Image (cartoon, rainbow, N blue to C red):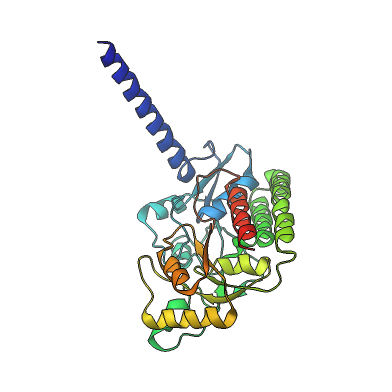
Amino acid sequence: MKNKYVFAGILLAMITAVSAAVIHFTTITEEPHEEREGALEVVTSFYPMYIAAENVIGDITDIHLTNMTRPQTGCLHDYQLSPEDMQTLSGADAFIINGGGIESFLDTVLKNYPDLPVITASDGIAMLEVKTFGISGPEADMDKGHDHGDRNPHVWMDVSKYMQEVDNIAKGLASLDPAHADQYRQNADRYCEKLEPLQTEAQEITRDAGQTNIIIFHDSFAYFADAYGLQVADVIELEEDNTLSAGQLAHLMQVIQEKEVKMLFVEKQYSTKVAEAVAKESGTRVYVLDSLVTGDGDPDSYIRGMEENLAVLREAL
């Protein structure tokens, strides 16, 4: 009989823990702020925009913030809108996007909701050009990156540019909701103050680095490299589970030798198998960075992720 009660107690504890985890996960995409009658309905396109908006909104209680995509969706390359997404946007008073072409579905959204106010976080931010490198012929598609045109939209990977995005979000929300304009400004300033130490740490890490050539396995890292004085020798973009052909591998070996590349930077969100194979063949080392496009919804998750990236950079240099 005693064992029976013990088993029941353990089962109840497990159910409670699982329920709590589910509630935390769904909160990120459904109701992270208390919903009230007449609340301003703000929707973000994906995780980096959600975290920025979450900090700008802070403890303002009559704002209902929703992230349109799940917190583990990742970057919005080729993302297809679902009926649930369209339903979410149908009730929005504002849609916060990164811009630069990363929300490839934006035309569809505006066609269906032409009066929806859109706050583009990257407005006024100078974007890097998408670079293509030395492979020619049929294999050239490997490293052209995702189709955003000639601009690289991953500006949040540069802390200074991310701070500009935070500022743009604050200005956009203030224009739509003047009653809380001062609070948006104060919250944005407070968040940027928390981001400043990342800049200081990065400058300290890279002060004596000199010219360092790297190969990156996601074009978002071009901003990380540009911000901290690293030279991108090549950009490799592969779909999940794809491998390099013999020609592609030969090209990389040539780049690594000619540019004296010692470091390969890969994305935490995807497999490192291809990079590990290249490293084994070339004698380079693989370093894993977080592209900051997934997370648990905590307001400080961008800061923690970038701190981890800087720790990787310190090790690499």
Q: Is residue 155 visible?
A: yes
Residue found 37% across the figure and 57% down from its top: 82
Closer to the camera in the image, 224 or 91: 224
Q: How many marks?
A: 0
Q: Quadrant of the N terminus?
A: top left
Q: Residue at x 45, y 88 (%)?
A: 136
Q: Is residue 20 above or below residue 294?
A: above
- Residue 300 placement (x, y as % from top left): 61, 45
Task: Name the quadrant containing residue 171.
Answer: bottom right
Mark yes or no: residue 141 visible.
no
Which residue appears farthest toward the top when viewing the image?
Answer: 1
**Residue 64 x %, y %:** 54, 42
For the point 74% across and 58% down, which residue is it? 204
Establish if 7 lies above or below 103.
above
Q: x, y percentage for residue 29?
A: 46, 46
Residue lying at the far bottom of the rendered structure: 137
> In the picture provided, is 163 more to the left or to the right than 297?
right
Judge whether 306 appears above or below 297 on screen.
below
User: Viewed as shown, does residue 172 lie left or right of 7?
Assistant: right
User: For this view, does 145 lie left or right of residue 197?
Assistant: left
Most foreground residue, 279 or 157: 279
